[in-house]
Each structure stands twice: as C-alpha cells, then as structure tokens.
Image (spheres, rainbow, N blue to C red):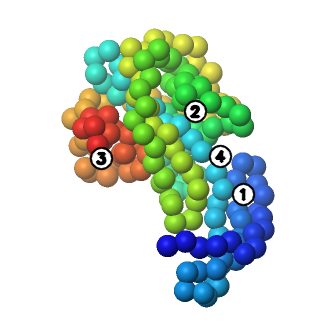
C-alpha cells in the first residue's frame, strides 16, 4: 500500500516542530489529506549504575499536566550524531557519561501522525560527569531496581512509551 503525495504545505512552523498538510492520492484512486508533525528525532538512554539499578528522571510534562518517570532523553540537534545526542542527554540530565553505550534499536512512538524516531541506548560502566542541565528543565533523579521498574510499568506509574520500550528491550532483549 502506497500513497502518492500530490501537494504538500507547511501548516505550522514552530520552535522545533513543524506540521505539514499533504494532499495524497490513495491506491484506490481517491484523494485524501494527511497532517504530519515533523520531528528532528531523539535519543533515549537506560542509565545503569554499577549495582544494576537504573536511574530514572521525574519531570513535569506540560502536554499532560503531570509528572512522568522517564529515562534521560532529548531531541537530536541539527547535524548531531545520534550517539553524541545520547551522551549529551545522559550528561545534561543525570550528570553521567559512559564509554560503554550499546544500541537497543529504534522506535516510532506515534507513527499515525508524527515522523519522530527515537534511538534507544543502554549506558553501562558509567562515570560521573559535570551536570549541565538545560535551563528549562527541573529534574529529580530516582534510582530503581529491575523489579521495581517492572512493578512501576505494571502499575502504570511508568507510562512513558520510550521508557517502557527501552527498559523491556534492556531487561529482556525484546
């Protein structure tokens, strides 16, 4: 199944997100419209302490008007290598770095309306690094064991998709 783009226009151009509206030709010959949020992509990292605990961050997310428990993550800057983004976010959000970063794969968190791809990593053998948080972030660190993280996913306390995917890939290789 393939849709052919007939016209495309930027309907919204924001700080780092754009929304395009496309007129498309469907395989059945009919025309329709698609609205797509364009996103630069992101990286997310499962930070593992020497004792096996995972560092999560608690931060407020305006879109949902609530705090979320998440792994460190952030958008890829223009011309930035993916691994560089992952290491930068680890440093900015929890004050650690790692020479042992392993790629866990990628996810498309909202493929129905957005082109965002999030690259997932695990950071082991971490060492403390100078914490350099973004000015607009208020983050609290929460350290959890594997069993605690799984219980938090099961109860819905962790409900952030990238965090759930990354933790399950790390814990179970899925």
Structural crowding at the residue carrying mark 3, measured as other residues with C-alpha within 10 Å and reported as few (<14), some (14–19) or many (≥20): some
Image quarter hosting the C terminus: top left
Please state which of the two labelled residues, at mark 2 or mark 3, is closer to the viewer: 2
- For mark 1, give the secondary structure: strand
Q: Identify the residue position indicated by label 4 in the image.
A: 40
Q: Secondary structure at mark 3?
A: helix
Residue 26: quarter of image: bottom right
Sequence-wise first label, 3 or 4: 4
Marks 3 and 1 sit apart, C-alpha to C-alpha, by 31 Å
- Identified at 32% across, 34% down, the residue is 170
Label 2, on which residue? 82
Choose the circle earlier in sequence order: 3 or 1: 1
Depth check, mark 3 against mark 1: the one in front is 1
Q: Secondary structure at mark 2?
A: helix
Decide: is 2 above or below 48.
below
Instruction: Mark 3 and mark 4 in contact? Answer it, CB < 8 Å.
Output: no
Residue 29 picture location, percent across and down: 60, 87
Comes first in the chain, label 2 or label 4: 4
Give me the C-alpha separation between circle 2 and circle 4. Answer: 11 Å
| Disc marking residue 18 | 1
Residues at circles 3 and 1 in contact by the CB criterion of under 8 Å:
no
Separation (CA) of disc 1 from disc 4: 10 Å
């Amino acid at each position: 199944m393939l849709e052919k783009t007939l016209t495309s226009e930027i309907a919204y151009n924001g700080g780092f997100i754009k929304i395009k509206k496309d007129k498309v030709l469907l395989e059945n010959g009919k025309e329709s419209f698609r609205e797509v949020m364009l996103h630069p992509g992101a990286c997310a990292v499962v930070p593992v302490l020497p004792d096996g605990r995972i560092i999560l961050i608690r931060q407020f997310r305006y879109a949902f008007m609530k705090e979320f428990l998440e792994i460190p993550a952030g958008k890829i800057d223009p011309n930035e290598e993916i691994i560089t983004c992952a290491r930068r976010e680890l440093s900015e959000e929890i004050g650690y770095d790692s020479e042992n970063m392993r790629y866990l794969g990628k996810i498309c968190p909202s493929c129905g309306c957005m082109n965002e791809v999030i690259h997932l990593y695990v950071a082991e053998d971490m060492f403390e690094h100078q914490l350099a948080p973004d000015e607009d972030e208020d983050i609290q660190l929460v350290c959890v064991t594997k069993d605690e993280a799984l219980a938090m996913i099961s109860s819905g306390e962790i409900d952030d998709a990238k965090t759930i995917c990354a933790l399950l890939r790390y814990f179970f290789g899925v």
